[in-house]
Image (cartoon, rainbow, N blue to C red):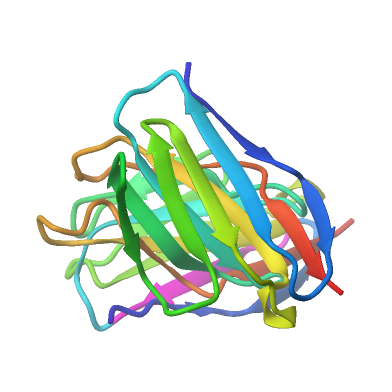
Amino acid sequence: SQTIHQWPATLVQPVGSPLSLECTVEGTSNPNLYWYRQAAGRGLQLLFYSVGIGQISSEVPQNLSASRPQDRQFILSSKKLLLSDSGFYLCAWSVGGGGNQPQHFGDGTRLSIL
Amino acid sequence: TQLLEQSPQFLSIQEGENLTVYCNSSSVFSSLQWYRQEPGEGPVLLVTVVTGGEVKKLKRLTFQFGDARKDSSLHITAAQPGDTGLYLCAGLNAGGTSYGKLTFGQGTILTVHP
C-alpha cells in the first residue's frame, strides 16, 4: 500500500534562518506531489505542485521554493524565513496523469517562526 | 481563479441533531471531494462525487453533487461527538492541464456536544 511521510512534525525556527521540509511517498511511481499551507482551522492554500522529477509549478509568489530531486521526494525550502512563513504545511500525493483522483496527505509540519 | 465558498464556517450542535454543510462556486468542477481533518493531522478523504446530481451515502453522511457540478452539500444525520472535526470540500479543476489540482473551500469546524 502507499504511504506518505512528512517530517519534522514540529519545527521552531528564528527569523532569517533557512528551512528544509521533506516529504517522501512509498508504494507508487510517478505521483503528482503537492505542498500546501493551512491557516488554523481553515482551508488549504496550494503552494507548489509537481508532475515529475525537476518539474515544479508555483501557485503563489512567496518566500519559499520547492524541489523534486527524486520521483517520490518533494522538498520545501527557504533561504531566509519570515515571520509570515509560520503555519501548518502539508504534503500530498495523487496518482499521476490527472483524472478524478483523490489526494493523500501527510500529517503535516507545524512551523513556528520566532 | 476558481473559488469554492464553504458555509457555515463554524457549527456547534448537540448530539442527535442534523446538519448540512454547503460548498458553492460559479465554476464547474470535474469532481468534488470531501475531506475530514483532525487537529495536528492531514485531511482524510471521505468521498468523491463525479457526476452531476450524484448522491453518495457513507453511514450517516450524505453527499450530493449539484446538477451543474458547481456546488455540493454534506448532510449528517443524528450527529455524534465523534463527528467533531474540520470538514473541507475541494473541487478538482476541469481541463486537461490541471494536473489534479484541488481548489479547497475555507472549511467548516464542526463541534458536536454530548
- B97 lies left or right of B29: left
- Which residue is pictured at 64% across the width and 52% down the height? A20
Nearer to me, B114 or B106: B106
Q: Is residue B77 visible?
A: no
- What residue lies at 70% left-to-right and 47% top-to-bottom? B41
Q: Which residue appears at 69% of the width and 72% of the height?
A: A81
> Is residue A32 highlighted in magenta?
no
Name the one closer to the observer, B21 or B102: B102
- Residue B98 lies in quadrant: bottom left
| Nearer-the-camera pick, B17 or B87 | B87
What number of labels is visible? 0
Residue A10 in the image, given as x and y percentages of width and height? 81, 51
Q: Is residue B32 above or below residue A40?
A: above
Q: Which residues are magenta?
A: B17-25
Q: Position of residue B55 (x, y in %)?
A: 32, 51
The quadrant in which the N terminus of chain B is found is bottom left
| Residue occupying image coordinates x 19% and y 39% | A97
Is residue B110 toward the left or the right of residue B44 in the image? right
Q: Is residue A28 above or below residue A99?
A: above
Give residue A53's position: percent from left, percent from top. 31, 39
Residue A95 visible at all: yes
Q: Would you place residue B38 above or below residue B91 in this image? A: above
Q: Main secondary structure of the magenta part?
A: strand
**In the image: residue A39, left or right of residue A66:** right
Instruction: Look at the image and tell me in which quarter the C terminus of chain B lies.
Output: bottom right
Residue B24 lies in the magenta-colored region: yes
Q: Residue furthest left?
A: B96
Q: Quadrant of residue A41?
A: bottom right
